[in-house]
Image (cartoon, rainbow, N blue to C red):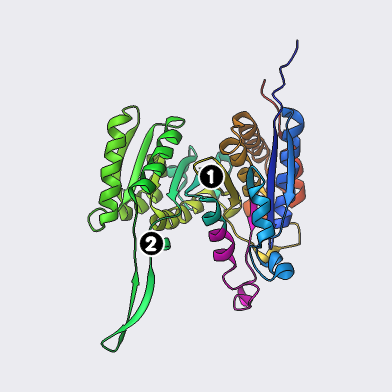
Amino acid sequence: MFRIIFFMQKKIAVLAGDGIGPEVMREAIKVLDKIAVIFDHKFLYNEELVGGAAYDVYGEHLPQKTLDACSDCDAILFGSVGGPVDKQTEKKWQGVEKNALLGLRKKFNLYANLRPIYLYKPLIELSVLKNNIVENGVDVMILRELTGGIYFGEHKTYMDNGEEVAIDIMSYKESEIRRIIKLAVEIAEKRNKKITVVDKANVLDCSLLWRKITKEFAQKNKNVDFEFMYVDNAAMQLMKNPNYFDVLLTENMFGDILSDLGSVISGSLGMAPSASLNDKNFGLFEPIGGSAQDIAGINIANPIAQILSAALMLKYSFSMIKEGEAIENAVINVLEKGIRTGDIYREGLRKVRTMEMGDYIAEAIVRDH
């Protein structure tokens, strides 16, 4: 029997960054190399510096050389940036996350942040939620608008009648809202066809505009269920019954808070990937756990979030759905065998180091014909 080969070649900007970034990135590349072999693809890696690593060489956190490399690639696989807790006031580390990540978001107009909140059944005991709440696992997609809202509005502090006044402006354009809702519909149609728009419409005009435009989409997309929920209630429901949600859509600040809240459901930050996309499906894919400088260089970090971020890259930027699912299935396979890094270990299982976990996941990847 002959097999039709659909060969694809993709260029990936690899920005490993600081702390555990280079360690977990090596394992993600190992897994991608296995995908390339068994699915007949070719991945070209352009490794560049970012964060403190870039500052050591260029005196800045996001040098032009790195931006140029990213522009010449099909996606960005990002590790982590940030320094030790006791060195945040040093020039090398001051503003590193803001300069690196916000600089990349602005440069490539990465307006949509996807945070899958996924609790694998073998890790149920590690979740902060009670077993009876998460006994069947958790699968929620938080979709956060990333380039508008209060974070990108005007910020100023001034004196008024002898006292300081601070102002932070939240604003949204109609076009910014429409594009993120459009993406939410596309994602929901591939999941359980339900979108919960989280806002504060009893207080904010921005939320009222979100609701107005959402209702227009609801009229045109009858196959998807739309609902609205205030952000305080959404935070409570995310902890009480996370599987109530399918696609949770919200603006920048609320999304920042809710996605961090949701990340603890999965049992460890080492299990939490993310994606940031623009309207051409160019994206930046990164674990959310940070640089973890306290465990850097000793081969104990959990590489799964970085590996799952690579899977998101395959699915959302390269439209390699089966390839991304092959990685996700390999992770499940390894966890079901009781193989764990220290952050997700419990007595009676097999504790492994960073490189071993990468080896096991790469070995578990198979092609489902």
Q: CA distance from mark 2 to mark 1?
A: 36 Å
Q: Which residue is mark 2?
A: 150
- Quick one: 266 or 325, which is closer to the camera? 325
Horizontal arrangement in the rendering, residue 110 relative to residue 362 (left or right): left
Q: How many marks?
A: 2
The residue shown at (69%, 58%) is 65
Mark 2: secondary structure: helix
**Residue 93 part of the magenta segment:** yes
Mark 2 or 1: in front is 2
> Residue 181: x and y, percent?
38, 41
Horizontal arrangement in the rendering, residue 119 relative to residue 343 (left or right): left
- Quick one: 306 or 159, which is closer to the camera? 159
* Amino acid type, label 1: Ile
Which image quarter: residue 50? bottom right
> Residue 177: x and y, percent?
36, 46
Give the answer, above or below, for where 3 lies relative to 274. Answer: above
- Quick one: 352 or 365, which is closer to the camera? 365
Q: Which residue is mark 1?
A: 124
> Residue 156: x and y, percent?
38, 74
Residues drawn in magenta: 77-103
Which image quarter: residue 166? bottom left
